Amino acid sequence: MKRLLFILAILSLALVNAGAAEQDTVNHCAAIIREFRQMPERAIPRDVLRHARGLAIMSVFKAGFIFSGKGGQGVVVARTGHGWSGPSFIATGGAGWGLQIGAQVTDFVIVLNNYDAVRAFSRGGNVTIGADVSAAAGPVGRTAEGAVTPAAAVYTYSKSRGLFAGVSLEGAVIGTQRESNFRYYGGPVRADEILSGMIPPPPGAAPLRRALGR
C-alpha cells in the first residue's frame, strides 16, 4: 500500500510539473528535437523531417502499481509558407491496470506526413492516434535517407527512460490545450490560426523553430 501511494505521489508530482510555464514546455520540446536529431544511427532521417508537414512533440510520464496512470504535454507545429508555425499546446492522459510496477518518462516526436494529419490537430479538439490518423513507427538512421514515401499519416518516434517496456501511442487521445494557448499568446486563439501561420510565432518560440530547422 505504501508503495502504491508512493507511485501515485510521483505521478501527481509529474502532472503538476506538466502544468509548468508554457515557455518551459516549448524549451523542453526544442531540447527533445535536438536529441532526436543527434542520436547515432537512431536519428530521425533528415528527409523525413524535410518533407514533414508538421510535428507533435511531447513527454509522457507513466507510473503504476497494479493500477497505472499516464499524463504528459507538449506542442504541435506546422510548416507554413513562412517557415514553422508557432506552437499549439497539446496534452494526453489516461489510466489502466495490470501487472505493471514502475515509472517511466517517454519523449515522443510525431511526424505529421500530410495535411490531413495537420488538419486533425488544427480542429482544436481531440485526436486519437490510430483512429483519426493512421500511425506507424518511423524509419530511423542513415539507411532510411531517401525513403520519403510515407507509409502512414503520421510517423511516431520515442525515447524512454524507466522501468516499463514502453509507452505506445496507439489509441492515445491527444487534446488541444486551449488555456495554455490563451496564456502563451495573450488572448483567445484557435489551433488552426496558430498552425496556419495566421498568428505570428511569439519570440519565445525561436529556440524551437531553430531546432526544427527548415
Image (cartoon, rainbow, N blue to C red):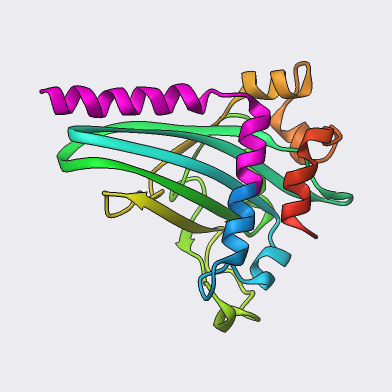
Main SS category, magenta section: helix
Of residues 82 and 209, the one nearer the viewer is 209
Quarter location, residue 76: top right
Tell me residue 153's x, y (percent).
56, 58
Q: Tell me which residue sits at (52%, 76%) in the image.
A: 41
> Where 89 sits versus 187, above or below?
below
Quarter placement of the N terminus: top left
Of residues 187 and 19, the one nearer the viewer is 19
Span of residues in magenta: 1-30
Q: Tell me which residue sits at (78%, 17%) in the image.
A: 186
Number of marks: 0
> Where 169 sits versus 67, above or below?
below
Of residues 84 and 117, the one nearer the viewer is 84
Of residues 79 and 87, the one nearer the viewer is 87
67 displayed left or right of 35: left
Q: Visible in this render: residue 157? A: yes
> Where 65 sits versus 84, above or below?
above
Going by the picture, which residue comes out furthest to the left?
A: 1
> Where 2 sits versus 169, above or below?
above
Quarter placement of the C terminus: bottom right
Q: Tell me which residue sits at (32%, 28%) in the image.
A: 10
Quarter location, residue 145: bottom right
Tell me residue 191's x, y (percent).
70, 31
Q: Is residue 16 magenta?
A: yes
Tell me residue 3's x, y (percent).
15, 28
Tell me residue 170's x, y (percent).
39, 50
36 displayed left or right of 23: left
Q: Is residue 205 magenta?
A: no
Going by the picture, which residue comes out furthest to the right?
A: 82
Q: Visible in this render: residue 122? A: no
Q: Tell me which residue sits at (34%, 28%) in the image.
A: 11
